[in-house]
Amino acid sequence: MTAPADASILPCNEGKKFLGTNKDSKGGKAMPFTNTRLIDPIHSGSMKEEIIERFIDKEIRLRDSSTVWLRELQGGNREKLRSFFSMCSPEAIRYRFMGSIKVLSDSLLDYLADTDGSRHIALIATHQDGENDRIVAEGRYVGLKEQPDAADIAVLVADDMQQRGIATLLIRELNRIAWNHGVTHFRADVLADNRAMISLLRKIYRPVSTTINYGVIHYELSIGCRENRLLEAA
């Protein structure tokens, strides 16, 4: 069964991180579950804060008239992030991390929660459920050291919040933030059986290139405002 688009994943190597560690080329130190290393921000700190501030505590009305709040992920959201991943279906997790993960490790959770506001940006959508404010979606991009104008992107939406346009919303906001930080291309690896996410990517972007290897489709996506269809897809 193919998951709805909002539950599908644009992995940014976290699945590969979980399955193994890489060595730091400078000191030989094991990097916790990472194939992607961050680089210094392209813009100044004031520009970074200005860009991110536009998206903090932003109320969004969804297709079904329900609302979510769009916020930047903070370190204090670590345990809520753990709860969010734990409530997602095994299929959604497989698409997100390119493999089965029963329990999110502390190392992987630390990595996901440790954003820098520039080259590793994470946004969350929260929904008021009774007295609890829970994370119902997360999206992020991670800048590439070897290609300063490119970043990996990932999105995950809780099963009970799918088909409401949240995935498109997160991609749109990440696209705008990345563009203002000098990023011109996103990379995405999508499992070949993830038809819903493949359809969503084709709806939003005009891929620069696509390749497939061992059941994984690798997309190179231009995020320039003139070269994608984010507004039409919203």
Image: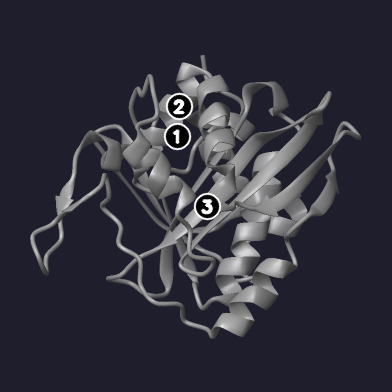
Residue 164, x across and y down, in percent: 76, 33
Q: What element does badge 3 sit on?
A: strand
Dot 3, crowdedness within 10 Å: few (<14), some or many (≥20)?
many
Task: Measure how far apart labels 3 and 1 are at the Cα level.
Answer: 12 Å
**How many numbered callouts?**
3
- The residue lying at 38 percent from left, 19 percent from top is 102
* Among numbered discs 2 and 3, the one appearing first in the sequence: 2
Residue 97 vs 189, above or below: the answer is above
Task: Name the residue beneath numbered marker 3.
Answer: 140
Task: Name the residue beneath numbered marker 1.
Answer: 96
Check disc 1 and give the amino acid type.
Arg
Check disc 2 and give the amino acid type.
Ile
Dot 1, crowdedness within 10 Å: few (<14), some or many (≥20)?
many
Task: Name the residue beneath numbered marker 2.
Answer: 93
Q: What element does badge 1 sit on?
A: helix
Q: What element does badge 2 sit on?
A: helix
* Among numbered discs 3 and 1, the one appearing first in the sequence: 1
Check disc 3 and give the amino acid type.
Arg
- The residue lying at 41 percent from left, 40 percent from top is 109
Colour mapping used in the image: one colour
Dot 2, crowdedness within 10 Å: few (<14), some or many (≥20)?
many
* Drawn side of residue 192 relative to residue 202, left or right: left
Q: Are marks 1 and 2 in contact (CB under 8 Å)?
A: yes
Mark yes or no: residue 233 visible. Answer: no
